[in-house]
Image (cartoon, rainbow, N blue to C red):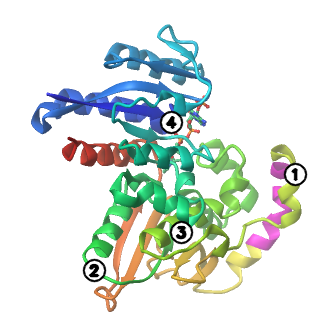
Amino acid sequence: MQRIPVIQIGMGGVGRVLVEQVLHFNAHYGARYGFRFAYTALADRQGAIVADERIPPATLLEAIAAKQSGGSLADVPAGGPLVDWQNLLTPVHSLVVDVTAQAGAEAGLAEAAAQGHRVVLANKKPLCGTIESFKALTERGHTRYEATVGAGLPVISTLRSLVDTGDGIERIAGCFSGTLGFLTTELQDGRRFSDAVVEAKRRGWTEPDPREDLSGMDVARKALILARTSGFSAELADISVTPLFPPELGTLSVAEFMDQLPTLDEEYRRRFETVPNTTWRYVAQVLGAGSTVGLTEVAPNDPLGSLRGPDNLVVYHTQRYRERPLSVRGPGAGTEVTASAVLADMIAFGREWR
Ligand SMILES: NC(=O)c1ccc[n+]([C@@H]2O[C@H](COP(=O)([O-])OP(=O)(O)OC[C@H]3O[C@@H](n4cnc5c(N)ncnc54)[C@H](OP(=O)(O)O)[C@@H]3O)[C@@H](O)[C@H]2O)c1
């Protein structure tokens, strides 16, 4: 039975579920596939657990429990401090799995890919540096990143199949944010903007600073990943992004920002109420040039207008699917589905591992 070494960076919501899913795969499907995953390193921001051959399942479960109760991997008996995740790389070719939201890892991950490691990402940021860094990270197919757009939905693999088989991508449109999907359907149902944001934050559907979602930058990163995967040489700065709050609220502390939210209620009430037979969704239009991300008027019976809650919709307008565009629709957030997309990428690499 082949063992595939795994270095996992990140033990948050997605990372913990991923470890559980990997253990389940090893126990139930490893024999069928002829390989099992062997964790050789597991890291959070402060600590890491490292093993030459494999971290035993009991230690992995201990690590999950420690993280669930708010601890660090530095504090578990098998753990130790971590200065930089790149120190975890060894000459042994491994699967390097980034389930953090860290910025600035693109060069290190591209270097790992160039050395023969394989990289799997739920983290969008390494794909959103310069176009050169995107190419360095993804060339030769050493990096997979299905979970970065649409969580568990087959958004990237569908696009890859279209591109690889010679279809021409004309544009991709849709709603790519579960958080903003929830927010706009709540507003459509007459809820106050401030109440809807507070609830999304309470449910853990926003980043700790909700402006990261409300700024539209998370959607812009997904649009950029789709544009680049389509073969367009786009940069993040090329995308026109309209945030859901005015610039003067951008400089406040999180607490001050939350206090100021009710000042936006009236504007959103009017916007969602005034035009009959119309509603609003936070829509991305991905094009070769001039991609846009922002609140857009749609008919309630339009596929975008009929979306509810945190569901995502990605519509591919291509040369082959020009008359009736191809679409992927479904829940676009959640730790279980996100982790499953990461694991599916790991299995895809496992099947071609030599
Ligand atoms: N949740 C979803 O539904 C979803 C859907 C699609 C994609 N994603 C993406 O998946 C990624 C993970 O999401 P999440 O919800 O699991 O986030 P999370 O709960 O905030 O967890 C992030 C983890 O990364 C660790 N980390 C951050 N910087 C690090 C560094 N420099 N070195 C080592 N570890 C580091 C954190 O360490 P500490 O534990 O020490 O803080 C934490 O364990 C994000 O990029 C997110 O955008 C999430």
The residue at the point 62 percent across, 24 percent down is 46
Q: Quadrant of ligand 1?
A: top right
For this rendering, which residue is in front, 226 or 276? 226
CA distance for labels 3 and 4:
24 Å
The residue at the point 83 percent across, 58 percent down is 250
Residue 183 in the image: x percent, y percent? 62, 61
In contact (CB < 8 Å): disc 4 and disc 2? no
Kind of residue sitting beneath label 4: Gly
Q: For disc 4, does the CB lie below 8 Å from ligand 1?
A: yes
The answer, for residue 309, to whether it is visible in the render is no
The residue at the point 58 percent across, 48 percent down is 205
In contact (CB < 8 Å): disc 1 and disc 3? no
- Which residue is identified by label 3? 223
Residue 77 in the image: x percent, y percent? 50, 7
Horizontal side of 230 relative to 287 (left or right) equals: left
- Which residue is identified by label 4? 13
- Which residue is identified by label 2? 166
Q: For disc 2, does the CB lie below 8 Å from ligand 1?
A: no
Kind of residue sitting beneath label 1: Leu
Sequence-wise, the earlier of marks 4 and 2 is: 4
In contact (CB < 8 Å): disc 3 and disc 2? no
Asked if the magenta segment contains residue 265, the reply would be yes
Horizontal side of 186 relative to 259 (left or right) equals: left
Sequence-wise, the earlier of marks 3 and 4 is: 4
Label 1 sits on a secondary structure element that is loop
